[in-house]
Amino acid sequence: MLLNALIKDESKINKNLYSAGPYWNYKNTRAILEIKKKGLNDFRGLTAGIGTSFADNLVLDIRNEFNIKGRIIGKFFSLPLVRRIFEGQLKITKDYIHSFLKYQSLTYETSKNVLNLLSKYKFENTTNFGCIQKFDYLDKNYSCHYLKMADRIDKLSNSFDFKNIKSFFEIGGGFGANIHFLITNFPNIKKILYLDTVPNIYIGTEYLRNIYKEKVKDYIELKKLDKICFTKNDDLEILCIPPWLIEKVEVEIDHFHNAASFVEMPKHVIKNYLKYIRKFDTKEISLISYGNFDIETTFDPEELNAFFDNKLNVSWKNFLIEKYNKKFIYMVSQ
């Protein structure tokens, strides 16, 4: 019901501002097909292409990554002889994936950075919905993805005191892991505005609803309102909205956060969001992005500072597991 309502209403809105740009259009169309076919139970596993690019699933069967035309062509692999060859390849690929997962788990279990984060933060229910990228420590399962979220927040804590934040706004929140991690560790964060495109906002809504039940307010409930506001109390409240509903929002925000998705949007879309970030009297801003980019669909993350009048402090920081030799750009308000 929620997914259908989001799809139906998205067809009526200003797509130039509120629908996926070139980077996400194909991915979102594919994800909708996968959700309708397989549901969300294993979206962090191997059997579905629902969360590819924003969740922590892994790709085993390339056919799950195709849209309609690709799936029609993919039926070629159902022919008896071809199917036998392809299934043999899937078995080999699955063996390689299991080897990767084994050694990734060992890397996380022995990483000093990871052990430091495990001692500093709480991690609860991080491996739901079929998570396969995980590791064990002291007889408890941990999601590798959640350790990445913890690492980001830990680095941002050098610039912000998350214990003083009451309201939080995130655009492009993945499937909700960052919000879950923040609420678990900073119970002072009570009012959350979470925005993402269709169908990502559906996945994030259901993921967070599985944890926080009635504390999550979804699109069907919120679209009926003339104004979308936080309730004036100290109860936890998570407002999950698609992009076009931002026009109805009237809140004040202590901290705005975006990780990676800004560089995946057309620049005029970012400018529109900035209009609302300012309207919400946002006190703090944090942006994170990866270093590599494809000029066809994304842009240089260092350009982001110009949208904020070049007032953000910029630094490049190592990835959680330094052996991976990755760096991410961090931009924070002064």
Image (cartoon, rainbow, N blue to C red):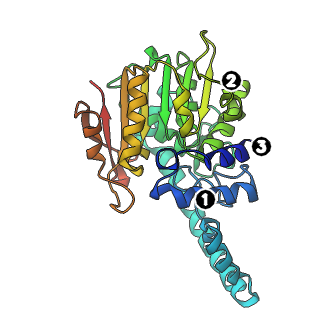
Vertical comparison of 207 with 4: above or below:
above
Residue at (58, 64) in percent of width and height: 97
**Could you tell which of marks 1 and 2 lies nearer the N-terminus?**
1
Q: Is residue 319 visible?
A: no
* 9 relative to 195 in the view: left or right: right
Residue 334 in picture, x, y percent from top left: 26, 24
**Could you tell which of marks 3 and 1 lies nearer the N-terminus?**
3
Residue at (69, 87) in percent of width and height: 82
Q: Quadrant of residue 298?
A: bottom left
Vertical comparison of 201 with 280: above or below:
below
Residue 30 in picture, x, y percent from top left: 62, 61
**Could you tell which of marks 3 and 2 lies nearer the N-terminus?**
3
Q: Which residue is denoted by mark 3 in the rendering? A: 1
Q: Which mark is residue 29?
A: 1
Choose mark 3 or mark 2, whichever is in front: 3
Q: Are marks 3 and 1 in contact (CB under 8 Å)?
A: no
C-alpha distance separating marks 1 and 2: 29 Å
Nearer-the-camera pick, 101 or 51? 51
Residue at (73, 28) in percent of width and height: 213
Name the residue type under label 1. Thr
Q: Tell me the quarter of the image containing the N terminus.
A: top right
Residue at (30, 27) in percent of width and height: 333
Residue 95 in picture, x, y percent from top left: 61, 69
* 331 relative to 257 in the view: left or right: left
Residue extending furthest top? 233
Name the residue type under label 3. Met
C-alpha distance separating marks 3 and 2: 19 Å
Q: Are marks 1 and 2 in contact (CB under 8 Å)?
A: no
